[in-house]
Image: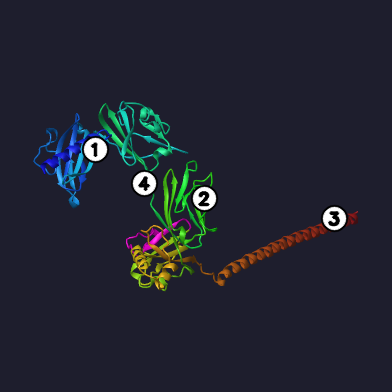
Amino acid sequence: MIQTRNVVILLALLLASTLAEEDPEPIFKVLGRELEMGFCFGDDIAVYRLTAGKRELLGQYSKPLISPPDAFKGRINTSIEYKGLLGLKITNLQFSDSGTYITECWSGNTMDNYRKHYIYVCNEEFGSQEISLTPGTGADLVCNMGSRQRGTVKWYRELHNISLFMDTQISFEPLQAEFKSLIRVHDKGSILHVSDEFIQDRARFFCLVMEREQCRSFQTIGQPEDPEMKSVYRSVGEKLVLTCSVDHLRQNHWKTPFGQVNSSAPLRLKGTTENQMSMSTSMNSEVYSLVIHPLTSEHSGSYKCFSTFLVEEYVVSVCPLLESTHISFSPGDKKVLLQCDFMSLPAINNKVEYISVLWYRNTGEQDIQIMDSGDPSLTLPKDLQGRVKFSQINSALILTDPKVEDNGMYWCVVLLDNDENYDDKDTDFNNDGGDEEDEVELYPLVMEEEYMDMCLFMQVTNLTFQPESEPESKSEPETSQTKYIVGAGLGGLLALAFLVGIVAVIKMRKKRSASVQGRDLELSEEEGRALKSTKT
């Protein structure tokens, strides 16, 4: 048994020497932290350090009495983690711990796993940052040099594994010839302008600032977080517009269940003349919309918009049945009841426990979920908080104290839990025929993703505010006011005429007085002349 084990170890050493020729995968850690060297299923884990081409055993789970090298004493811990995973940890990392390590996992005499790493122990880690896309095409990778302007930079890219692609201590050009046309170097290698091709497939980057062989700092540079997935529920025959804000100078496209769409030319499904998808975009607009019209159940699925990175993700559910109603409310109404009448559907028979009901609304900008029968923790929009209740009996939505702002379109969506879908499919495979098969054809599974629930029904309610009509009596004050104004005007005219008449009378009297005085003066003069003549 011991001899067999020795042979296996010899073969493992030969394998290790072969794998040692490959570049070890790097691990970046900060001084004083701890490092988990990996977990192993099986019976044993062993960790070695390569020093001058020789292996030093740091620790082995099956040999707890073996003492590690002096530099690691008191800092090596082996443990059994969750579900029997074996682990080995190095604590209180030192600069001298930087180097190459090998981890082996064993089950009996069989080595199940072999991993080789190069550990960089650095002074500090700078906060991660996002890749900076530049207008039109490409992106900038900016490494934080801190106060160390004389350091060199190592650049790593992570796809399936982490690999070194530039070391400014060696050259200001990429180490791989195929990358030379994809990378431009600036500021002594601390800034790289890279092509879209180089950052695709969710690539992540690491930069290390080095002083000779000692790592002083490292930083992670990655893509933005994926956008939140949006659920969209529509009915057969509708027109659907999925919006996406992009840089129109970049290479933009949509990924759909039917392939990639990146032009304004309509895309028809095979064997049809109606099912179309097209782009709606403008060179002067950042909106890059995918238009689908008319919708069919085949259009259900995942739709992703890319502008180098993923910008928007929609999951579209096309519901086979639709009902539409209109409800008006006035200021005096204390509540409005929005119905969701699905209980009479044949597809609901004996499946109520697998049903969930969602409520949405659209006030002109976007779809907003306001209720989920399976998730009571869902937060209501602020303007509806304290005014909306969900009826567990008939799945209706009760809106109290309705306001003008509540105008808009509301709809309920009835979903069949995917667990029940699987049960139905299993039943169908074991069924030679009958009524159940007809039901499946009538209500087909409309979601292509198996993890999605099946949409059975959608009911739309258009809620409209109806202001109260004004009573006729309200016009009387205006009429009285008009009469008052007209009367006042006439009165003013009469008063003016009266004043004019008075002035005229006064003037006439003055004229008459003057005339009388004139005649009296003439008579006096004549009498004087007559008296004078008599005296003579």
Q: Closest to the observer: 408 or 2?
A: 2
* Disc 1 residue type (three-letter): Lys
Q: Position of residue 341 (x, y in %)?
A: 42, 71
Mark closest to the chain's N terminus, 2 or 4 = 4
Q: Position of residue 261 (x, y in %)?
A: 49, 49
**Which of the labelled discs sits on residue 116, or is there none?**
1
- The mark closer to the camera, 4 or 3, is 4
- Please give the name of the residue rendered at 57% of the width and 72% of the height, measured from the top-left corner: 472
- Please give the name of the residue rendered at 61% of the width and 67% of the height, measured from the top-left corner: 484
* Disc 4 residue type (three-letter): Glu
Q: CA distance from mark 1 to mark 4?
A: 30 Å
Q: Is residue 375 magenta?
A: yes
State the extent of the magenta-drawn residues as a range: 364-385
Mark closest to the chain's N terminus, 1 or 4 = 1
Q: Position of residue 36 (x, y in %)?
A: 20, 42
**Which of the labelled discs sits on residue 525, or is there none?**
3
Let me know if residue 133 appears in the view.
no
